[in-house]
Image: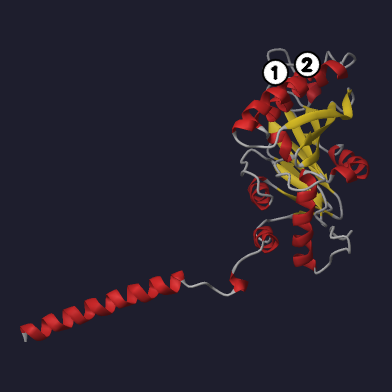
Amino acid sequence: MRDMLKLNVLSFANVLTLGVYVAFCLASMPFPAQASETNAERASRLYNTITWVKGPATASLGSHATIDVPAGFQFTGTVGAKTWAEINENLADDTLDGVLMPVNLSWFLNLHYNDIGHVPDNEKGSLDADAILRSIREGTDAGNIARRQHNWPELHVVDWIHPPSYDAQSNHLVWAIKLQSTDGVTGNYRTEILGRTGIMSAVLVADIDSLPSVIPAAKQLLSTVRFTPGNTYAEWRSGDRMAQYGLTGLITGGATVTAAKTGLLSKLGGLIAKSGKGVAAACVALLAGLWKLLTGKCKADGKPAA
């Protein structure tokens, strides 16, 4: 009986070992090609996990502001924005308050509130575009040292796409820079909307060739950003926390130079430049595949259908 028990134990152990071995072999076997996701299929899977607010609607940008979502557009908040960043192969960003885009995914706006304090606008009539561009070039050139160490493409500031301008009525500070890298030409179009104790930052991500037609639509969307009561620029009171820089600093030190030194400007809103047209073209190529998967529609040139 004892020998029989021993034999049964050994048999069980052998079966268990064989089972583990078979499982290992199965795990090591190549699966059919359809089990491997393409970039567009992965993007589609992630996209379908996002909760979208479809226009017409009003969406909250955290607790500080709201924005109108018109018909033909969609919005997602912080959680969805994090997934959207992952779709675009960008580091997940928990600080985004939302992403707004047309339903055809052809371009989008990243929106983020920065609690930096009240930014004085006493430079509104004296923004020196030439001096600001020189400062950005210096910061970008310094950043190229770090980029070379990481084998990242170097960046070189070409010129303004849109020199800095400030609208004192809407408290919108706008600028756009064209940059050149070995991956192509990229653009960085930003809008800073000043509030009582911080700013709502908006970064436009679009194919650089489409910027002339996209910018007016983006401006219209951003004109609907409204700070909640108590947070508007006009409601500043003596004693409120002040920012450490003004309008020029928002461009050269508050955001742009920091991004340039870390290589983020080469990503136009966090996307990796992969083609001759630059970063946004890579985004459009990926989203064209996603749009085709979601709708079965794709224009002959490979761009998302309108």
Q: Position of residue 285 (x, y in %)?
A: 78, 55
The residue carrying pointer 2 sits among few (fewer than 14), some (14 to 19) or many (20 or more) residues within 10 Å by Cα, namely some
What residue is pinned by disc 2? 120
- The amino acid sitting under disc 1 is Ala
- Is residue 197 among what the camera can see? no
Mark yes or no: residue 275 visible: yes
* Colouring used for the render: secondary structure
Q: CA distance from mark 1 to mark 2?
A: 8 Å
**In the image, what residue type sits under mark 2?**
Pro
Residues tagged 1 and 2 counted as in contact (Cβ below 8 A): yes
* Relative image position of residue 138 (x, y in whole percent): 74, 20
Q: Position of residue 178 (x, y in %)?
A: 83, 33
The picture places residue 78, in percent across and down from the top left corner, at 65, 45
Q: Which residue is mark 1?
A: 243
* Along the line of sight, the residue nearer the viewer: 295 or 211: 211
Most distant residue in the left direction: 2
Front-most of residues 51 and 218: 218
**Side of 291 relative to 244 (left or right):** right
Judge left or right: residue 141 versus residue 123.
left
Residue 150 in which image quadrant: top right
